[in-house]
Amino acid sequence: MQHPSRFLGQKAKLTIMKKILPILIAVTVFGCKKENNHPVKGTVLTVNSGITVVAVENPDPNKYSFICSNDMMIPEETINSCTKNVFVLNLPGGLQVEGKKIQFSKYKDKGPNPIWSVSFAAHDLEVYDARER
């Protein structure tokens, strides 16, 4: 028995490919989830051994995967809390200044910092486009 594609002519094969190609392109472009589509603005709180604590402005768990909701009523002064702060692992040295206002949009969330044994620990982030604002 012959393969079904042998029965189709060259013109029919091109027509099928012309219909499939735009669908594949659309799925590739629009089907990918863009996780980091909200720029993160924050202020450097502390710097210790190259790890920087950044307070996120307008921390919204619906916008940022690394921010948790404050359902547990975590005290505001808790610096390692995931409700408003992150640990930036690779902030450039020029930006590692307490009080400096920064912004970034390309980052990788490495999850809660394993040093802290609490469920509300701030997440570790690797950032790729940090800049002063």
Image (spheres, rainbow, N blue to C red):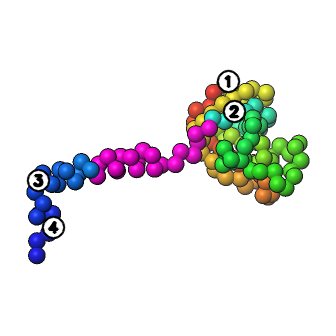
Which residues are the magenta region? 20-38
Residue 49 in sight here: no
Residue 8 in sight here: yes
Residue at image point 78% right, 58% down = 119
Q: Name the residue under label 3.
A: 10
Q: Name the residue under label 2.
A: 41
The secondary element bearing badge 4 is classed as helix
Q: Position of residue 84 (x, y in %)?
A: 77, 42
Tell me if residue 27 is in the magenta stretch.
yes
Amino acid, disc 3: Gln
Q: Earlier in the sequence, mark 4 or mark 3?
A: 4
What number is the disc on residue 111?
Answer: none
Q: In this view, does 5 lie to the left or right of 43?
A: left
Q: Which of marks 4 and 1 is in front?
A: 4
Amino acid, disc 1: Arg
Amino acid, disc 2: Lys
Confirm or deny contact between disc 2 and disc 1 (CB under 8 A): yes
Q: Earlier in the sequence, mark 3 or mark 2?
A: 3
Residue at image point 73% right, 55% down = 114
Splitting the image into 4 quarters, where does residue 87 fall? top right
Q: Is residue 25 left or right of residue 31?
A: left
Amino acid, disc 4: Pro
Q: Earlier in the sequence, mark 2 or mark 1?
A: 2
Confirm or deny contact between disc 4 and disc 1 (CB under 8 A): no
Q: Mark 1 points at which residue?
A: 133
